[in-house]
Each structure stands twice: as C-alpha cells, then as structure tokens.
Amino acid sequence: MKKITIAIDGFSSTGKSTLAKQLANHLGYVYVDTGAMYRAITLFAMQKEYIGSDFFDKEKLISSLSSIQLQFKFNPDLGFAEMFLNNVNVEKEIRTIEVSSFVSKVAEISEVRTKLVEQQKEMGKNKGIVMDGRDIGTVVFPEAELKIFMTASATTRAKRRYDELVQKGDNVSFEEVLKNVEERDYIDTHRDNSPLIRAEDAIEIDNSDLSREEQFNIVLGLANKITDIN
Ligand code: DC
C-alpha cells in the first residue's frame, strides 16, 4: 500500500497528539510530536538559565543550538517514542506548566525553527509519517497528501489540559491553565516566523463535541480515501 504524509496542525491541547498516535499505530506509520522538540529546547534553555520568568538571553541560546542533540526513541511499553535531550530522557520534564509557559517564546526564534524544520523534513523523507505541530502543513510538508487543522474552544482545551495535569499530580489551577492556553494561542498565531495558520488545503476539524473515536474514524476515512485513489 502506498504510504502518505499526514500533517496535523492546530491550537494547543486540541488533541492533535492523541489523534496522531492513533493514526500512526493503526497505519503502521511513524509518529512525530514536533511540540516535544520545541519543548526540549526550552527545557535546555531553562537548565542553562538562559530563560526565566523575567529574562531571556536569546543570543546565548542561539549560539548553543549546535550543542543540542534531540532524538526520539521508541518505547514499546508506551507505544510511542520518547524525547531525549543530549541522551537524557526528558519526556516527563518537557510536559510541565513551566516549560509550557516559556515554549512559545523559544518557538519564535527563527534559528530554532530552521534547525527543527530541517530535522523534521529529514524524518519524513520516506513518507509513512504522521507529524503534529503548528506549521507542518504549511512549512514542513507543504506537499503532504492529507492535512488536518484541529480546533476546539479555549475553555474545552484548558479543561482537557487541566484534567491531564491534575491526574499527573501537578498543583495547578484551572485559571492558570486557561491563561496559558490563551497566551500560547496569541503568540503562536501572531509570531512573524511560521505563525499557526490553516493551510489552504487543510481540512478543519472542530472536536469540541467529538469523541476521540469519532474524530479518529473521520480522519482515518480521509486517509484511506487518499491511499485507495493513489
Ligand atoms: O504541541 P505542543 O503544545 O506540545 O507545542 C508546544 C509549543 O511549541 C507550542 O506552544 C508552539 C510550539 N510549536 C511550534 O511553534 N511549532 C510546532 N511545529 C510545534 C510546536
């Protein structure tokens, strides 16, 4: 069967990674969470104290980029690949609210985007890939056969994120999570470099009122149609 490229973009906490993992598992494709890559660089900047609540030394981060090695390693117990930063598993650390609160600032830097987009293109050169992010259908794989743009209301998304964080034992308030979701929406859609926009040929799915299964079946149907035609 012919393999295609599936690009999934959209606002934060729209369930892109859940959908992308389901599709990749079902189709036997590779799944790449590009947000994890931006998060890992953010964690690096935090560890080196280049970024904090009232400072950000962009130049230091830019000049250290060549020393940052990112790798996805598949964990068969989890069924997906975990993020390694300079050979250390950082999968858990990159998901904290602290990383979320700084990541949009790091993702604005064009040198960071150039480095990561290059790696992402390389990972997808043999197709058979489901990649999620913000600029996958517009910048990384403008030629992707299937592009999905996911949306849901900010409160629906904040509620999902809040439940996830609380379940992991994070001590956060719903208001804090909602504020973070809204701030990231603003920065992600207003940055000069590769802002989050829907590719013209992307199919928009608002999943505020869709179950995971309904959403999966819709997108799998679209993917099957494309592979059947080709
Ligand atoms: O998908 P996520 O919430 O884990 O992404 C974290 C941040 O990284 C998000 O606020 C925007 C940024 N990002 C990006 O700019 N481009 C991507 N392809 C993926 C993520």
Image (cartoon, rainbow, N blue to C red):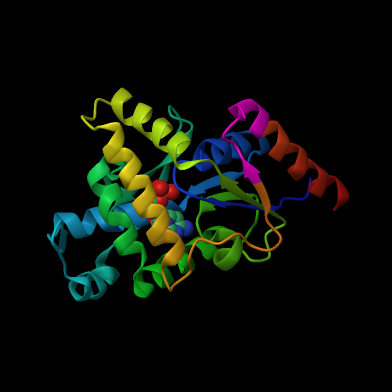
Residue 113, percent across and down? Answer: 41, 68
Percent coordinates x, y for residue 134 in the rendering: 50, 57
* Residue 208 belongs to the span the image colors magenta: yes
Front-most of 89 and 152?
Answer: 152
Q: Which residue is pictured at 34% across the width and 58% down the height?
A: 104
99 or 94: which is nearer to us? Answer: 99
Q: Give the magenta-colored segment's residue range.
A: 205-215
Residue at the spot 67% in from the left edge and 59% down from the top edge: 144
Location of residue 112 by image quarter: bottom left
Does the magenta segment cover residue 134?
Answer: no
- In-image side of 177 versus 132 (left or right): left
The tally of labels here is 0
- Name the foreground residue: 34 vs 118: 34
| 96 sits left or right of 182 in the view | left
Of the four image quadrants, the one with ligand 1 is bottom left
Whole-percent x, y for residue 17 in the image:
50, 41
Determine whether, in the image, residue 204 is placed left or right of residue 50.
right
